[in-house]
Amino acid sequence: MAHAQEIQLQITGVPEPESGDKGCDSRDEPEPDEPPTRRLPRSRGVRWWALVAVDMLMLLAGGTVATLLSRLYYNSGGNSKWMSTLTQSCGAPLLAIPLLLTPPAPEEERRRPAPSKLAAVYLGIGVLIGVDNLMYAYALLYLPVSTFSLVAATQLAFNAVTSRLINAQRFTPLIANSVVVLTFAAAMLGVGASSDGDGTSSSGAPPRGRYAAGFVLTLAASAVLALILSLYELAFERVVRARTPRWVLRTQMHTNLVASAVAAAGLLASGEWRTVPGEMAAFRDGPARYVLTLAGTAAAWQAALAGQVRLVARVSSLFANATGAVQLPLVPVFAVVLFGDRMTGVKTVAMLMAVWGFLSYVYQHYLDGRRAAAGKDGAECAVCAARAASNAVSSAS
């Protein structure tokens, strides 16, 4: 009887189900000691897209507010690059609140990564975050916020390279179109930099050398951020081997604590900590506004990073980067209203190209979801048909 069932399954071309299979709708869960593998596309229902939408909203809202508050810090008299660097990661202790409120998932008990590997992940990514934050702090001082935000779109092109080399990202014409269009959108700003007369600080426009330095620093920071996101994805696949909400929060919190230690060390070593009391006293609208600006910036950065890391764990590092590109049409508009930045024709075209590039990427994920759903339905029908045929063979014998 078992021999007849095996022959029937071979004829139908469907692999024999593993022992313990609980039906057509069940999904095989990898055992804790199985080697990590690349996630395959799966069907994406309304709940999955709803969770992704929440993560996207956190990234877009948090990133927009954090960028604008960072610009406000400089425009209101702040000048400490290390303090600006510290605010990008020092809000990490706030993540302890949702971490304590989130119940552990069952797989967390079965999969406990080696402490030495986790320490290497936290230290390595944390130091990179600290360096990246410092470059962004200098870049935001040297560039208008609208130009800074659009040049930062190059991180998507860098991430396309790192995700291909590190995460084996599959590329399609739509994804390639998204990357190329967003990269050209940022490159247009470099070509049209001479027509950008925005001021970057309360003392007026910077010299040409500082504008060029800000442009280069933004490109370098974008490349490092792309590497960081790909390393996050690699850590979830190879070290943590779990993508639960608690592990996402835990990873983000520990890496940002390391980045905060790097920034605090830089603040002390550079001697900028001595200027903080005077900077606070001279800050526009007083010390209270100074503290609120820094606190709001820190909280907004952590909200944005939470959405970004969750997107890395839920989808991919490239999708998280593409979502960050949607922030591009938002920041320049608010910058025009709040800081008096000029919205030139080059920036307008670049914003439209950024939206086009992101929509191409979203449409690709929509197509992947439809294919995965169709493939799953076909596989389930084949398995059920094979079982029905094997039962018929068994009854006949």
Image (spheres, helix red, strand yellow):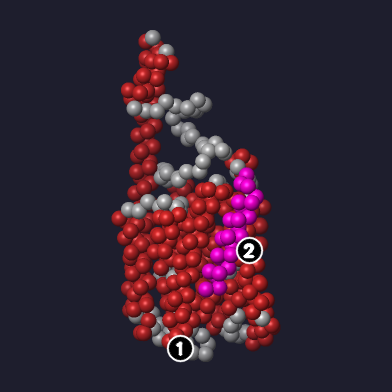
The reply to whether dot 1 and dot 2 touch (C-beta < 8 Å) is no
CA gap between label 1 and label 2 equals 34 Å
Q: Confirm whether the magenta stretch covers residue 123.
A: yes
Spot the residue most to the top.
397
Q: Residue at x 40, y 52 (%)?
A: 169
Q: Amino acid at mark 1?
A: Pro
* Residue 58 image position (x, y, % from top left): 52, 61
From the viewer's perspective, tell me whether residue 392 is left or right of residue 290.
left
Instruction: Give the extent of the magenta segment.
Output: 112-135
Q: Confirm whether the magenta stretch covers residue 270.
A: no
From the viewer's perspective, tell me whether residue 43 is left or right of residue 253.
left
Residue 321: mark: none
User: In which quadrant of the rendered image does the N terminus lie?
Assistant: top left
Q: Amino acid at mark 2?
A: Val
Determine which residue is flagged by label 1: 207
Are there few (<14), some (14-19), or many (20+) residues within 10 Å of tag 2?
many
Towards the viewer: 278 or 59: 278
Q: Name the chief secondary structure element in magenta.
A: helix
Are there few (<14), some (14-19), or many (20+) residues within 10 Å of tag 1?
few
Of labels 1 and 2, earlier in sequence is 1
Residue 258: mark: 2
* Residue 79 image position (x, y, % from top left): 58, 83
Q: Residue at x 35, y 39 (%)?
A: 374
Spot the residue most to the bottom.
203
Q: Residue at x 36, y 85 (%)?
A: 194
Q: Secondary structure at mark 1?
A: loop
Picture quadrant of residue 336: bottom left
* Residue 189 image position (x, y, % from top left): 37, 76
Q: Secondary structure at mark 2?
A: helix
Q: Residue at x 46, y 79 (%)?
A: 214
The answer, for residue 26, to whether it is visible in the render is yes
From the viewer's perspective, tell me whether residue 320 is left or right of residue 363.
right
